[in-house]
Image (cartoon, helix red, strand yellow):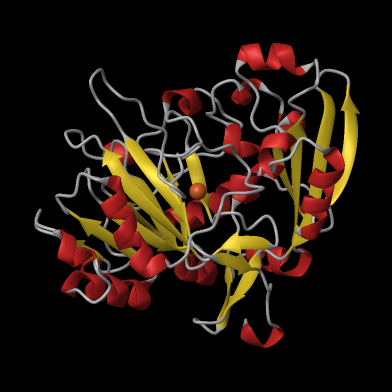
Amino acid sequence: MAALAVSAARSIRKEVVNPRWWSGAYDVIDTSRFIIDGKGKVCKSDLLPTSWLGQEIQEKYDDVGVLHLQNTGLVDMADQRTLARIIMGEETEYEGGANPRGRAEGLANVYDIGAPLMADLHYHHEMTYKSHSVTSLGFLCKHAVTTRPGVGWSFVSDSVQAHDYIMQTELGQKLKEKGLCFLRRMTDAEDKHMLDRNKQGSVYNHWQQSWMTSCPQEAEARANAQGLQVEWLDDKEDGRIMQTRYYKSAFEYISFLDRNIMVTSIADDGEWFDSWPGIMDIPQEKRPLEMLFGDNEPFTLEEKQLWTDIYGMFGIPITWKPGDVAVVCNMRFAHGRPGIELLPGEKRELGVMLGPFYERMETREDKW
Ligand SMILES: [Fe+2]
């Protein structure tokens, strides 16, 4: 099946983590619980929260934590945004995220994915590597490949089922006991060493872009306010580097589930860049992201593969058509997608919305 295909870049490399996005069966969650067919006839009055559609998308989302509205017939992304807003409420401005993003369609608070199409995007929860995350994510499909099944699909993974599985393993117990250290290395947009890197296309994110300021003190203050420890490094090849460390649980107490679940994955490790043009050639120790256990013990490749496989076991495809809207609870579900290689004439474009801020609380001892 196309969705299970491993990218060419990975298949010839041995020391990498291979994501397997889903089992190939729709048995993780009954699709009728989270898919709605708009029958190609969604009209302006359906965009109201009080409409049949507004009520149904809210009910399904409240029940499962993911909603995929298909076949809307909508061509205006602003209408898709209106529907997503029924569930998401007020959006969040994108600040301090791991990767740079522009605006999609010039719409306020609708962003480009901010990653190369050809890169595999491992399952992840958005921004759980810092204290401020978001409650939900909205995805609006502008263009999709509809003639080759599996190409361009996104995937979500049920973190409740993934959590229950990983806690049966030694890795789950180690994560619980030790916690995590998220390390980020951000380059300096104004450093002369960046001239070559810019030419090579191997720059990921400058700290100025991530923190929306060109003042290092201000960037540091914003990072500190989010619980990150900051070090400024002077790298022989890359010049000034802003390195941040953030120590956090791999898990989170989710009030509406009244339990702790896993909300982290290897997407915040160097593996994020294994198929990322330009950055895939940078050695692991210099890549912009790294993860360690909370006592600074590195992960083994086997541990990373197991963690990745567990998300894959509980993966569900989101099969895009233009006009589709998906809203995902950022705590209950991880999201990701395989790299995409388009044929001439094909397009695949999604806009992303970030829901209201979520302040991570970490775990509760009595809720394991
Ligand atoms: Fe994401």
Residue at image point 37% right, 38% down: 105
Residue at image point 71% right, 66% down: 249
- The x and y percentages for residue 170 are 66, 64
Q: Quadrant of residue 45?
A: bottom left
- Asked if residue 290 lies left or right of residue 87, the reply is right
Residue in the foreground of this view, choosing between 13 and 317: 317
Residue at image point 43% right, 48% down: 352
- The x and y percentages for residue 368 are 62, 81
Q: Quadrant of residue 274?
A: top right
Residue at image point 48% right, 23% down: 9
Tell me if residue 23 can be seen.
yes
| For residue 228, above or below residue 1 | below
Residue in the foreground of this view, choosing between 336 and 42: 42
- The x and y percentages for residue 268 are 64, 46
- Asked if residue 329 lies left or right of residue 301, the reply is left
Q: Quadrant of the N terminus?
A: top left
- Asked if residue 215 lies left or right of residue 24, the reply is right
- The x and y percentages for residue 55 are 24, 76
| For residue 29, above or below residue 150 | below
